Amino acid sequence: MFVLNIFILIFFVSSFVLSLYGLNMLILTLLFLISDRNNQDVDVPLEWPKVTVQLPLFNELSVVARLIESVVKLDYPRQCITIQILDDSNDSTTDVVRDLVSLYQQQGISIECYHRSHRLGNKAGALAAGLLASKDEFIAIFDADFVPNPDYLKKVIPYFNIKDVGMVQTRWGHLNPFHNLLTRAQTIALDGHLVVEQVARSRNDLLFNFNGSAGVWRKKCIIDSGGWQSDTIAEDLDLSYRAQIRGWDFRYLFDIVSPAEIPSELISFKSQQFRWVKGSVQCLCKHLLNIIRHSKFSFWQRYQAIMHLGGYLMHPMMLCFLISTVPYMLYADTDKLLPTWLGFAGFGPPLLYAVAQISAYRDGLSRFVWFPVLMVLGLGVAVNNTKAVIEALFGYKSDDFVRTPKSSYVSNEENEFYANSNYLLVFLEILFGIYAFVSLFISISKFPSMSPFLAFFFIGFILVAIFSYLETSRLLKKVKE
């Protein structure tokens, strides 16, 4: 009986926590709908300030030329812009970079390559090194998979005329949204954050974050907030919270879009998710007490900040919910269903993502039809993301930063890393898939209202396991060749 009570407690606690996140998505959607999404009118400066554009790279052979070619086309006074290529690569990316730098220097463009023979501090270390070399007032950052529009800086820099603005983030666009089912699902997920959540938080005086790319910082803000730090693998989120705790103001520009490439392979997506999840939870552990103790934050601001940093805790809660369903349905009194308002929270995710698609695109409804694929994907990577949460909470490999491969390019060394890591996860995903099937079978007679959700669990785990296995086997084959 004691063990049964434990499982019932896990069932209700996990259901309650998941419902809190679902309800919060409804709240953020409402805040988005009542917010003015038009950018504030700002005056163009009489003299354009100097800007350093930083391009952090690590083994980006397939996309580095596209990135550099787009950045040198930025429409900004040539004497006021400096391009820093922060290259930590250990492959032929460095040779490509040096050739392009030499070519553009001959054309009078201020562009330099800063190559490190180590990855000390990972991306944060590269950004910190570049900051020391910069003498400019503002720092713009673009990851390797981005293609900024020529008018980007002239649209963004005027917002720094507003007092105390330390960072301006712009919305990410997508270069390959229709490449396959995976990119379609990721587009919906990313838009949920970049279209709805970021606007809702920024326009309602809530803490939000620099997304790591397609944003501009005031150099003084970075330094005043403690600079780039590498004790988490989410240096962008970490600095964002330190700066806002220090009192700096942030802006989010909804209608300035910078296109970027979405991972088109499942193994790359899982790697990216792992880093985002682990880094976010590391930041939650690092900043939780500072947020709670901050006297200038209202209770609402603190609550939303904790929900923001702890958003990925949903994944271990999903696994806890799944594990507890079988004993709950077999031995508990299933007539005592969850409160109605908890079920109502389930409308949060689909509504938020639907509003994001409709608000961002004319064909938003036709894009949203792929939402079930996102549900399958989101549930299927729960094992991968729960592993990231556990590592973050227990401090395992705290500085382990794994890049996300672009355009299916992965070096042999990375092939081996992804393959070894994913084979272990595939085994666990299959086990959870089998368990989800058993739970689904029981729910049909015991708890029919849970059957659709459990069916998504089963499909998600099995499909993610199958495709992860196939991609991992292909990568291992490449290594042997």
Image: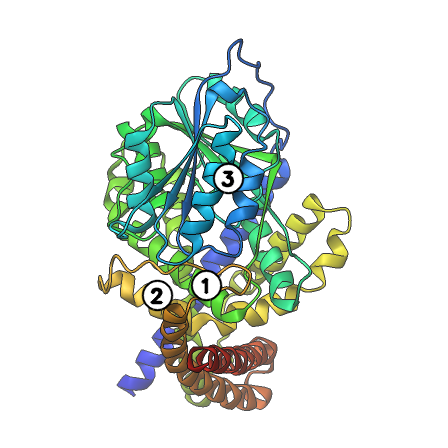
Tell me, yes or no, whether the two marked residues, 3 and 2, touch with CB atoms within 8 Å: no
Query: Neighbour class for label 2 at 10 Å: few (<14), some, many (≥20)?
Result: many
- Determine contact: label 3, label 1, CB under 8 Å: no
Q: Which residue matches tag 1? A: 18
Residue 185 position, x and y percent, is 61, 63
Distance between the alpha carbons at the discs numbered 1 and 2 = 18 Å
Q: Whole-percent x and y of residue 10? A: 36, 74
Q: Position of residue 443 (x, y in %)?
A: 55, 86
Q: Amino acid at mark 1?
A: Leu
Q: Residue furthest top?
A: 46
Position above or below: 137 against 443? above
Q: Position of residue 297 (x, y in %)?
A: 34, 33
Circles 1 and 2, Cβ within 8 Å, touching? The answer is: no
The residue beneath circle 2 is: 388
Q: Which mark, by number, is residue 223? A: none
Label 1 or label 2, whichever lies nearer to me, is 2
In this view of the protein, which residue sits in the foreground, 421 or 81?
A: 81
Tag 3, which secondary structure? Answer: loop
User: Is 206 positioned to the left or the right of 185 in the image?
Assistant: left
State how far apart marks 3 and 1 are (Cα). 31 Å
Compare marks 3 and 2 and give the one earlier in the sequence: 3
Q: Residue at x 44, y 68 (%)?
A: 15
First reached walking from the N terminus: tag 3 or tag 1:
1
Q: How many marks?
A: 3
Residue depicted at x 42% and y 17%: 163
Q: Closer to the observer: label 3 or label 1? A: 3
Which circle's residue, 1 or 2, is located before the other in the chain? Answer: 1
Which residue position holds label 3? Answer: 214
